[in-house]
Amino acid sequence: VSWDQVLSTNANAIMLIATLAGLVLRDRVRLCGTFAFYLVLAFTGNRLALLWPELFWNYDWWRAKENAYSIVSMLIVVEIAILTFAAAPRARNVTLALVAGVLFLTLVAIVDGPLQQEYWVRFGVMEPHGKAGSIWLFVVLLAAANYFRVPLHPLHRSIVLGFVLYRSVWAWLLAVLAQERMAAYPFVSALDGAAYLSTTSLWCAAGWRPQAATALTPAAHARLRPWE
Amino acid sequence: VIFVALSGALAFLLLLAWRDELALERDWNALIHATPAQAAYEHVRKTLLLEQRAVDFTWGRAAEEEAAGRREEALRLLAVGYEYLSGVTGDRLRLLRRLRLYSRMVSGIAPLPRFRRRLFVLQHGFRALLSIDQSDQQPGRFRVLTEDTCSALRTLLEATERAG
C-alpha cells in the first residue's frame, strides 16, 4: 500500500464518517436509510483494507466489497424511487418496472462477460458493465422524475449525482486498466482516490447543508413528502 | 461499455440540468390546491366561449358588409378577425401545452387513457387552422377545436379530482 493510497483512503474515511454524522445530527437518516447503510459499509470496508492490508487489500476482497456496494446502490435507487413517488403510485410502479428492466439487462451483460478471460480483461470489462448498469439505474430514476414532473429532495439529488459522477469516472478508469494493464495502476489508483474524495465531499456537504428553500405549501409537502 | 457508461452520465447530467425543482414544486402546489373540477372548468370555459363569440361576431359582421356591397369594410373586418384569431390560437396552443405537462403529473397518480394523443390532435388542429385557404371555414373549425379543448380540459380536471 503506497503512501498516496493511505492518504486518500484516510481522507475518504473522514468524509464518509463526517457525512454519516451530518445525516444523524440533522435527522436525515430517515430520508434515505439505505444511503446511511452504504456509508457504514463503505467506512467499514475502507478501515478493514487499511488496518489489515494483508487480509483485505486484495482482488477477492475488493471484488466482494464492490459487489456489496453495487447491491446497496441499487437498493438506494429503489428507496429513492419509492420516496420520490410517494404521492404518485402509478409513476412509482412504472419507475420500479424500468429499474427492474435495467437490472435485468445489467445482469445479462455481466453473465455474458468474459469469465474465462485473463485477469486484467475480466477486471476491466466485467466491472464497468456493473458500473454502467448502475449509472443507467440513476438515469432511469431521473428520467421518470422528469417525465412525471416530480421534484427531487435536495439530499436525494446530491446522492444520485455523487454516484453517477463517481461511477462514470470509475468505469473509465477500469477500461484504462484493462487496456494498459499494471502500468496504469498507480495513475488509476490516484485518480480513483481523488474522484471518490470529490464524491464523498459532495455527500458531506449535502448531509450538513441547512434545509434548502422549498416552494411547496405545507399541504403539498405533506402529500408529496410524507416521510420527511 | 465505456460508451454506455459515459453516455449514461451525460444523459443524467442533461436531465438534471433541465430540471427546475422550484417550478416543479409550484406545479405540485397548483395540482394539490386545485379548484374543484366543475368550478375550474366553468371558469376556463367561459373565457374560451367569450373568445369564440368574438371570432364569430367579426366573421358575421364581415359577411354582412360583404352582402351590403361594402367590400373594403368586409376585408378590413376579416383582417382584424384574422389577427385576433391568430392571437387566441396562440393562447389555445399555450393552454394545450400546459395541459400536456399537467397531464403527465396527473397520469402518475390516476390513469388518463389516450389523453396526450387527444392533445396532440388538438394542437395539430389549431396549428393547421391559420393555414387553411378558405377563411370562411376558420370560425367553424375554431369552434369545434374550442369545444374539444373544453372537453379535454374537463377530462383532465375530473381525473385530477379523482386523484385527490
Image (spheres, coloured by chain):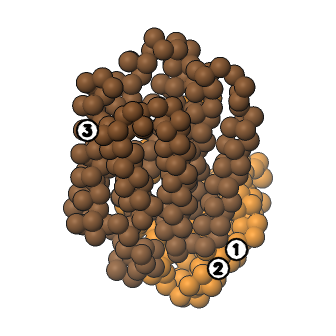
Q: Viewer-proximal residue, A97 or A16?
A: A16
Which three-letter amino acid code belongs to the residue tagged 2? Ala
Locate residue A142, reporting x and y percent.
52, 52
Which chain contains the residue that carries disc 3? A
For disc 2, the marked residue is: B159
- Left or right of B73? Residue A86 is left
Q: Which is in the foreground here, disc 3 or disc 1?
A: 3
User: Do discs 3 and 2 belong to a common subunit?
Assistant: no
- Examine the rendered structure and indicate whether residue B14 appears above or below residue A99: above
Q: Colour of chain B?
A: orange
**Residue at the location (37% across, 55% down)?**
A40
Residue corresponding to mark 1? B111
Q: In the current view of this chain or complex, which residue is farthest to the front?
A: A54
Q: CA distance from mark 1 to mark 2?
A: 8 Å
Question: Do the residues bearing badges 1 and 2 touch, measured as CB atoms within 8 Å?
Answer: yes
> Which amino acid type is shown beneath numbered disc 1?
Pro
Spatial CA distance of label 3 from label 1 is 51 Å
Compare residues A170 and A59 and report the one nearer the observer. A59
Q: Residue at x 58, y 49 (%)?
A: A137
